[in-house]
Amino acid sequence: MRTVFWEDNRVKMIDQRLLPAEFVIAEFNSVDGVARSITEMYVRGAPAIGATGAYGMALAAQVSTASSRDDLLADLRAAKDVLDAARPTAVNLSWATRRLLEVAEQTVTDNVDDLRSALLAEAETLADEDVAINRRMGFNGAAVIPDGANLLHHCNTGALATVDFGTALGVVFACQEQGKSIHVWVDETRPRLQGARLTAWELMNAEIPMHLIADNAAGHLMRAGKVDVVIFGADRIAANGDVANKIGTYKLAVVARENGIPVYCVAPTSTVDLNLPDGDHIPIEERGDDEVIHLGDTLIAPAGVPVYNPAFDVTPHRYITGIVTEEGICYPPFTQSLKNAVNAAQEKIVENRLKRKK
Amino acid sequence: MRTVFWEDNRVKMIDQRLLPAEFVIAEFNSVDGVARSITEMYVRGAPAIGATGAYGMALAAQVSTASSRDDLLADLRAAKDVLDAARPTAVNLSWATRRLLEVAEQTVTDNVDDLRSALLAEAETLADEDVAINRRMGFNGAAVIPDGANLLHHCNTGALATVDFGTALGVVFACQEQGKSIHVWVDETRPRLQGARLTAWELMNAEIPMHLIADNAAGHLMRAGKVDVVIFGADRIAANGDVANKIGTYKLAVVARENGIPVYCVAPTSTVDLNLPDGDHIPIEERGDDEVIHLGDTLIAPAGVPVYNPAFDVTPHRYITGIVTEEGICYPPFTQSLKNAVNAAQEKIVENRLKRKK
């Protein structure tokens, strides 16, 4: 099943906050609700957030009471602002909402119901494309994973982080499909434990050999020669190849380079933000104290302790061996290779849109 | 109050497993019990484990039914084996038990009660020395901490990790006594959260400015220029200056060097193992899955997930700026500076023992 989908005029999604203990489908019938599902992390992972934003725009059109094209466009622009503000770091969100808004702006009709249909169709297309893109990306990445490799993986980048299949974990699934024997060291990924809760769950379900580790153990494994490739996703990639990803990625990448271990970032071109020259321009979300000091109902630090909790960090491009996209693997100099990949992907979107119109 | 102490013919200690939620004094009246208090981490921290081992030897003498010197020595040797096996990495444990056994071997008397008294006196001396050593070490280290510094600290190295005052946190306490304005970033230190549970508690009690962070956030802070010094303790230091310390120390040290941030290890000379040429010879304890997958009663990963849980890692000496001991700060080449410090400390122990005999 998909992580996020449209059904009965609602946006539905797996409530990832409850996994692996409970499997619950949450549903939202308002733009505010969809924004909250992103902020409160019912859904997370840059591509999944993008698809959720697209469905949120489709929902905005459905629930809008506008009877004119101009009024509907105004409602859509307002909805885009609400959705884009849900989380600041992943660029896929504004990439998707902009794409939906452009469809509305470019669809020349005064029939608002036709506009509503066009938006829902575009959201479904974007979700379908996400799955197709992830499969291409997975097999592109699998080409650089040797048979028998030990991978070290951070956060969750699987089916749950996307509409389906995943980004960095998509590479792992592609290796499995190719019959490669691989083993994954799974960083638990404090503070929200996406590795322990989600990646471990996905890999166990897929029967892929793995061990869960505290994030602190990753360096020890690398120094001991027990890691062949470090692999992770991205929430935003600047034009020069600097990568914003889940907090802790930077430490991993530095220690990997120190030990001569290749580092691959796996992300669709929708994660690339060519408007930002480098990673220092990427906004880094700071989240609440609660994520660090509570675990379920258990208080794991003294009450009232001051906390600093950035959700992401930036890994400068010099620590990254390659960025795996649906258009192939980008290598340094990233400024050129990323631009080529983004352009190729954008051409495909336009081409497909024209094909569907015919 | 002290972390571990002798009272009513028992070894008593703060049960650190329960902090900060509960403050409980545990007590043990058998050698097996004392060994269990170390294995199960009622008490932890290399110097505190050393003092516990010393008291364990004193207890072994008290509870022994031996009526001859030879029988008592046999019981002590057996007790040393039991205690030394409690945890493998920290060398302070076998250093302390050996010191106690040597006192028994060198005390020329056939009166077993005199031997019992000599052992208890030596354990008390070792505990007193630990506090005095930590204060000296703290002020030695404070000399390299600038006023206004932001320190990044891993695990717990405070009063709780020693008999009192601490090693790396002793440096922090010394800075406070000197009126320096400092701020500490506290690594929560997964999996056992000694930073969140113990270091945060000690610093809040001492009213030292601090923020708790997920271990993953440390790199982000270093790259942002918000860390002036990285500071931690040690469980064993090889002759060449390679340091075994709490898992995650290696990653921290590598990222610190990458960012030009000085890295100080703070440990008494009893942590130095001149018999080991380098860190690759230090045994690394692997602990149970439970530490990674449970938090209190909460299961934080899928049931049955395979786990790898090393408790320590080794930081090669090239990442370490200086090793702060009670005999001053050792700088590279560590092979020479550490040997000098150990010899100076050893001479003081012998000198003090002769003084007390007079």
Image: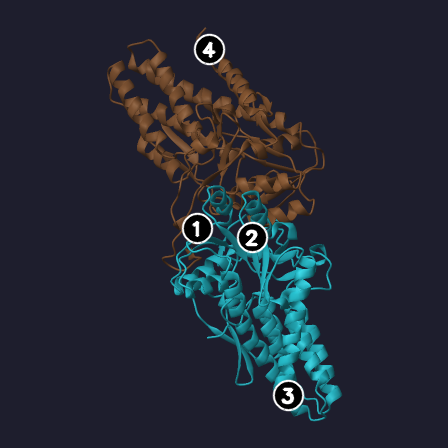
Chain colours: A brown, B cyan
Q: Which residue is under mark 3?
A: B357
Tell me what residue is drawn at x 65 percent, y 84 percent. B354
Question: Pointer 2: what residue?
Answer: B263
Q: Which chain carries label 1?
A: A
- Same chain for mark 3 and mark 4? The answer is no
Q: Given this view, does label 4 or label 1 mark the residue nearer the observer?
A: 1
Q: Is residue A78 above or below residue B110?
A: above
Q: Mark 4 lies on which chain?
A: A
Figure check: A95 above or below A264: above
Which quadrant is the C terminus of chain B positioned in? bottom right
Tell me the chain of label 3. B
Query: In the drawing, what numbered circle is on residue A292?
Result: 1
- Give the structural element (helix, strand or loop) at label 2: strand
Q: Left or right: A250 with respect to A55? A: right
Task: Report which residue position mark 4 lands on.
Answer: A356
State the separation of the CA atoms marked 3 and 4: 97 Å
Q: Residues within 10 Å of mark 1 (few under 14, many from 20)?
A: many
Q: What residue type is labelled 1?
A: Val
Instruction: State the image coordinates of residue A313 (x, y, percent, origin top left).
Output: 48, 39
A341 or A181, which is in the foreground?
A341
Q: How far apart are marks 2 and 1 (CA)?
A: 25 Å
Q: Where is residue B49 in the image (x, y as percent from the top left)?
A: 59, 69
Which residue is found at the position 73% from the left and 61% from the top? B276
Q: Do the residues labelled 2 and 3 touch (CB within 8 Å)?
A: no
Amino acid, disc 4 = Arg
